[in-house]
Amino acid sequence: MKTSKTLLVAGDALALAILTVIGFASHGETDISFVPRMSTTFIPLLAGWFLLAPWFGLFDPEILSDPKQLWRPALAMVFAAPLATTLRAALLNSAVLPLFTLILGGSSAIGMVVWRGLYSLWRRK
């Protein structure tokens, strides 16, 4: 059981990293020189996710094994994205951009539902 929880946490982090890279790639910013800038998005997003995910039961074994509960990661990201963009703005000493918050939240919610859905399928086998 501990191994599957470790896999879940690592998968969450990897999914958010992949989503961050995809976001930057959509703006043509995939060069290695963008890694520090990517981290100013990835680290706050990771912090927001792992601070809020437990409140939504996203590490509870009963919820993890029920595909009907896949709405939970999306809802958690609805709250994690504004937290992440607020942390990012504080880190960069800049303003929170509402459109960026919506796009980050929406794309991350979709990505986390896909990842958590795959994890749920793997766990049921």
Image (cartoon, rainbow, N blue to C red):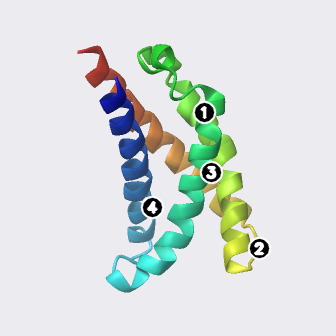
- Residue 24 lies, with reference to residue 20, above or below; the image says below
Q: In terms of depth relative to the viewer, which is nearer, 2 or 34? A: 2
Q: Give the mark nearer the N terminus: 3 vs 2.
A: 3
Which of the numbered marks, if any, corresponds to residue 24?
A: none
Q: Hey, what amino acid is under mark 2?
A: Ala
Check disc 4 and report its element: helix, strand or loop.
helix
Q: 108 left or right of 31?
A: right
Q: Give the mark nearer the N terminus: 2 vs 1.
A: 1
**Cα distance, mark 2 to mark 1?**
28 Å
**Count of numbered labels shown in the rendering:** 4
- Residue 97, picture quadrant: bottom right
Q: Hey, what amino acid is under mark 1?
A: Pro
State the residue position of label 4.
Answer: 20
Residue 50 x %, y %:
57, 45
- Give yes or no for contact between labels 1 and 4 (Cβ–Cβ under 8 Å): no
State the residue position of label 1.
Answer: 54
- Give yes or no for contact between labels 3 and 1 (Cβ–Cβ under 8 Å): no
**Cα distance, mark 3 to mark 4?**
14 Å
Q: Give the mark nearer the N terminus: 3 vs 4.
A: 4
Q: Give the mark nearer the N terminus: 3 vs 1.
A: 3
Q: Residues within 10 Å of mark 2 (few under 14, many from 20)?
A: few
Check disc 2 and report its element: helix, strand or loop.
loop
Residue 122 x %, y %:
26, 24
